[in-house]
Structures are given as structure tokens and as C-alpha cells.
């Protein structure tokens, strides 16, 4: 094997288009959320303008956001100008001697094999993560970012067969050092395990139903309190516990990370609790029998309806129900 390999950053094509698409995908959900609030009359246009025009709304947030974007661009330019050296001694990320970014040399990294704590090949993310014993200077190497460079006679050309993964395997790095279990669990593909695949499908159906039912409903909510939510909370917690037990059982047949089981159980419990709340209203309408009539009176502030029968709940005035 050659004494040393040098990898350089690949030149990104159409990077500005990718950044524009990324920014659009990042901002789009917020725009949809505000449009939905305006459509449901949960937020008035004049209220939104008043919030943005409020003197207490500090421009520091905008400045911080711009600074983060600029820092991200500078960091990407800095790392694109560096090279990755891999040999028998270790891994080094260095800048060229005459680089205009030499002043940022403090961000260079040098990880000798003797100081390495663990080395993980995350196939799902297509990267290699190196973590030193000191806990600082973590290095994530994405395959798609690097290519071989021929800088001397003992280096292969850019089209040579050994790539990053091959070099690390020839050095037997993955055999000498343990893997980071947290990264392995994070790269677990939920769509390939039979149990999690079915669970994700069920969660998607419940979310779709809750969303569609909420958008189509014509009723208004009269009041909220813990006693009203308690059955749905109990349903959600019970569902999460039972589901966690079933997934732990399924994990014995085919491995499933413990953290993924707990996370999916909590997520499923929340989704099931919300779906039971939304669906419970429909079930009550279908099998609850004829509606009951009761006499209510407005209170002095005209914000609540007080029942003559003290066993009935106070009806609050949500914004959309004020006309009633």
C-alpha cells in the first residue's frame, strides 16, 4: 500500500440551486402554517402585522440568522480548500501552505491512530466518523465530498480504485477500534425492519386522518380541561406501553435499537392520543344518542357561558365561536 493518500474536496455543481431549494423547503412549512392559521381565522392579518411592527420585536434575531448563514458559507469554503491526508500514522485535515484561509488553521485536525477512541462506518449516512479519546475534534468524513488527488509519485490518481472506505479497510481501522453505537442506532433504517415499516404506515394513516378530519369539521370546541383530555392521555400512554413491549419482542427476532423502540413508542402514543381525541368526537356523534338541551347565560365579561345546571361545564368562547 502507498505510504500516504491525499483526498481533496469535490467541486460542487449547481450549489446555488441546491441552496435555493434547501431554503425553499426550510421556509415553506412556516408559510403553510401561517396561511392555515389565517384560513382558520386563528390569526388575523392585522394581528400578524402588529406583531412584526412591535418595537419589542428585536432585530437581533434577524442579525443572528444572517450571521449563521454567512458563517455556514465561510465554513464550507474553508473546508473545500482543505485536504485530507490518510497514512499509517493517522488522519489529518490540513490547509495548503499558501491558502488564504491559513489564518483559520486552528480548525485543522490531526487524529493519530494511537489517540483514536472509535471509528464508525455509517452505511446509511455514507460517512466515516472518527472520535478521539479527548472527546473533541470529532471528524465526519462524507464519501461524496472527497476524491483522490495525485500530488506525488507515491499517490494514486483521482480515478484510482482505492477510495476512502477501501483505504480505511486496508488499514484495518474498523477492526482495531470499536464503533459508536449511537451513530449506528441513528443510521438504523426504519423502512426495512418489518415491524417498524408497518408501524410507520399506521402512524401515517392516523396523522392523515386527524389532519383531514380537523380540516373538514364544522364544530367548535366549547371548553378544554384535564378531565376532558384524561381518557385520551390514558389511551395514548397505554398504547405506547403495549407497543413498546411488542417491539422489544420483535427485536429478539430481528435487531432493533433500544432508542428507536422508545422513540417510536412515544411518537405512536402521542399520535394515537390525538387520533383518539379527534375520532372520539365522531364516535360520540354516531352512538351518543340524541343531543341534550341545557340553559346557559353569559357572564359579566361576556367571555363564557355559565350553565344553570352546576353539573355541566362552563362553555368558553373560542375565537371562531364568538358569533354563537
Image (cartoon, helix red, strand yellow):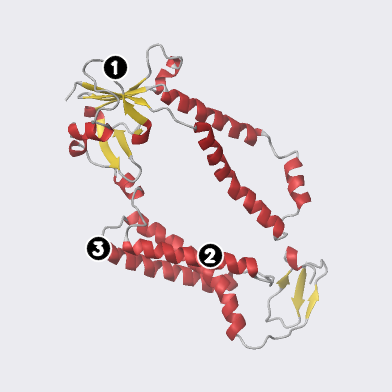
Residue on which disc 1 sits: 151
C-beta proximity under 8 Å, tags 2 and 1: no
Q: Residues within 10 Å of mark 3 (few under 14, many from 20)?
A: few
Choose the circle earlier in sequence order: 2 or 1.
1
Can residue 137 be seen here? The reply is no
Mark 2, secondary structure of its residue: helix
Q: Nearer the viewer, mark 2 or mark 1?
A: 1
Residue 120 as seen in the image, left or right of residue 267? left
Choose the circle earlier in sequence order: 3 or 2.
2
Residue 35 location, x and y as percent? 68, 53
Pick whichever, 49 or 193, lies toward us: 193
Pick whichever, 131 or 10, lies toward us: 10
Q: Residues within 10 Å of mark 1 (few under 14, many from 20)?
A: few
Residue 183 location, x and y as percent? 33, 44
Pick whichever, 171 or 135, lies toward us: 171
Residue at image position (59%, 81%) is 284
Residue 212 as seen in the image, left or right of residue 223? left
Residue 322 location, x and y as percent? 78, 67
Residue at image position (53%, 40%) is 22
Residue that extends furthest to the left in the rendered view of this protein: 1
Q: Residues within 10 Å of mark 2 (few under 14, many from 20)?
A: few
C-beta proximity under 8 Å, tags 3 and 2: no
Choose the circle earlier in sequence order: 3 or 1.
1
Residue at image position (48%, 72%) is 235
Residue on which disc 3 sits: 252
Mark 1, secondary structure of its residue: loop
Q: Nearer the viewer, mark 3 or mark 2?
A: 2
- Rendering quarter of residue 42: bottom right
Residue on which disc 2 sits: 208
Amino acid at each position: 500500500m502507498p505510504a500516504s493518500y491525499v483526498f481533496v474536496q469535490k467541486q460542487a455543481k449547481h450549489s446555488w440551486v441546491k441552496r435555493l431549494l434547501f431554503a425553499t423547503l426550510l421556509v415553506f412549512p412556516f408559510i403553510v402554517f401561517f396561511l392555515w392559521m389565517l384560513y382558520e381565522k386563528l390569526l388575523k392579518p392585522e394581528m400578524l402585522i402588529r406583531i412584526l411592527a412591535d418595537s419589542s420585536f428585536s432585530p437581533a434575531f434577524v442579525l443572528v440568522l444572517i450571521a449563521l448563514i454567512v458563517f455556514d458559507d465561510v465554513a464550507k469554503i474553508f473546508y473545500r480548500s482543505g485536504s485530507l491526508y490518510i497514512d499509517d500514522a493517522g488522519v489529518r485535515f490540513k490547509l495548503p501552505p499558501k491558502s488564504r484561509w491559513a489564518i483559520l488553521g486552528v480548525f485543522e485536525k490531526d487524529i493519530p491512530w494511537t489517540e483514536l477512541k472509535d471509528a464508525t462506518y455509517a452505511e446509511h449516512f455514507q460517512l466515516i466518523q472518527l472520535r478521539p479519546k479527548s472527546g473533541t475534534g470529532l471528524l465526519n468524513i462524507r464519501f461524496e465530498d472527497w476524491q483522490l488527488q495525485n500530488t506525488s509519485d507515491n499517490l494514486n490518481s483521482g480515478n484510482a480504485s482505492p477510495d476512502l472506505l477501501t483505504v480505511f479497510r486496508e488499514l484495518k481501522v474498523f477492526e482495531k477500534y470499536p464503533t459508536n453505537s449511537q451513530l449506528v442506532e441513528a443510521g438504523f433504517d426504519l423502512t426495512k425492519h418489518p415491524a417498524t415499516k408497518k408501524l410507520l404506515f399506521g402512524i401515517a394513516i392516523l396523522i392523515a386522518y386527524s389532519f383531514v378530519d380537523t380540516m373538514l369539521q364544522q364544530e367548535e370546541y366549547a371548553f378544554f380541561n384535564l378531565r376532558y383530555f384524561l381518557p385520551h392521555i390514558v389511551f395514548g400512554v397505554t398504547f405506547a406501553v403495549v407497543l413498546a413491549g411488542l417491539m422489544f419482542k420483535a427485536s429478539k427476532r430481528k435487531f432493533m435499537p433500544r432508542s428507536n423502540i422508545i422513540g417510536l413508542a412515544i411518537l405512536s402514543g402521542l399520535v394515537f392520543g390525538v387520533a383518539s381525541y379527534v375520532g372520539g368526537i365522531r364516535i360520540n356523534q354516531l352512538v351518543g344518542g340524541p343531543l341534550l338541551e341545557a340553559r346557559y347565560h353569559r357572564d359579566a365579561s361576556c367571555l363564557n357561558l355559565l350553565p344553570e345546571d352546576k353539573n355541566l361545564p362552563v362553555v368558553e368562547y373560542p375565537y371562531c365561536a364568538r358569533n354563537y
